[in-house]
Amino acid sequence: MFAPIAPRESAVEACAEQLRQAILGGTLKPGDKLPPERKLAGSFGVNRMTLRSALGQLARARLVEVRQGSGYAVRDFRQQGGPDLLPGLVDVARSSERAAIVDDLLRVRRHLARAVLEKLVTMEPDLDAVRDAIDDFGATVDDGVAAVAEADLAVVRALLAATGSPVLQLCTNPIERAVREMDWLADAIYAEPEGNLAGWRALLAWLERGDPAGIDDLMAILEIRDEATVAHVAGRSSVRPTKGRRR
C-alpha cells in the first residue's frame, strides 16, 4: 500500500502525505487500524521516530487517533476534520467529483461573504483600509495570479477587520486558507482579474451608500463569478491538480 520514501523527500512530510491520501481517498476507512509502528515504518523505509512525527501530524488533523493498547486507528474525517483537509480531498477526488467539491466550497464562501456584508450594513464602518486594499489590488492586476491572490486576501482581511467580529474572522480564515492552498483553483478564480477588481469596486460603492437592498445584487455578481470558476475547473477536471503552494 505504501512506497518507500525517496532520499530527497522530507521523510516526515512524505509519510504523512501517503497516509493522508490513503485516508482521504478511502483506501483506509474510518475505524481501520494502522499496521504496527515497526511494520509501517519498514514500509516507508524510515525509523519509528520519523513515523511518529508523521502520525502526530495526522492526529492533529483528526485523521487518526491513538487507541489505548491497540495503536493507531483511522477517524471519520467527514465528522471530525476541518476545512484544512479540503485541498487534500480535492487532490484525491475522482475527476467527476472535483468540480462538485469546488462548487460546495465556493458556496460556503458565499454564505460567509453574505454574513460579512449583512454585518457591515448595520454599522458605520471605517472603510479607509478597505479602500487602500482595493487600490492595491488594482495595482496588481497585471502582476500574475500569485500577486493578485495575495492582494485579494488583503481586501478580504480588511473587510473582516471592519466588521470587528472575531466569529466572522475565525470562520472565514480556514475557508480562505483552503482556497489558497490550491494553486490551480486560484488560476480559475483570478483568470480575469479586471473582473475581480470591478467586483471589489462595486462592493466599495455599495458600502459607501449603505444600502441594505443591494446585498442580493452583490451576491448575484459573486455567484456568477463562482459559476465561471466551477466551469473552468470542470473543463480541466481530466488534468490532475498541481499540489503545493505558489511561492
Image: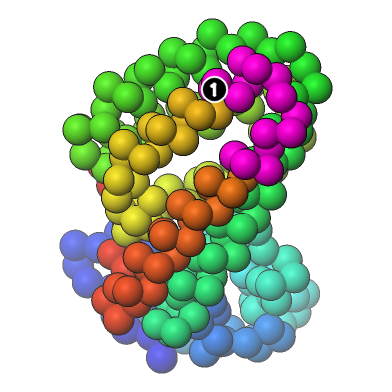
Q: Quarter-wise, where is residue 2 in the image?
A: bottom left
The x, y position of residue 241, in whole percent, is: 32, 68
Residue tagged 1: 204
Viewer-side residue, 42 vs 117: 117
Residue at 31% x, 40% y is: 193
Q: Which amino acid lies under the numbered mark 1 shown in the image of this protein?
A: Leu
Left or right of 130 in this view: 136: left
Which image quarter holds the C terminus?
Answer: top left
Residue 197 higher or lower than 158, as above or below: below
Magenta span includes 130: no
Q: Residue, x 69% and y 13% (percent of image)? A: 125
Q: Secondary structure at mark 1?
A: helix
Q: Looking at the image, which residue is at 75% across and 70% down? A: 79
User: For residue 166, what is the image quadrant?
Assistant: top right
Residue 189 rendering spot, x and y as whole percentages:
39, 51
Q: What's the magenta bit mostly, secondary-structure-wise? A: helix
Q: Is residue 95 above or below residue 161?
A: below
The answer to if 211 sits in the magenta stretch is yes
Q: Position of residue 203 (x, y in %)?
A: 55, 29
Q: What's the magenta region?
A: 204-218
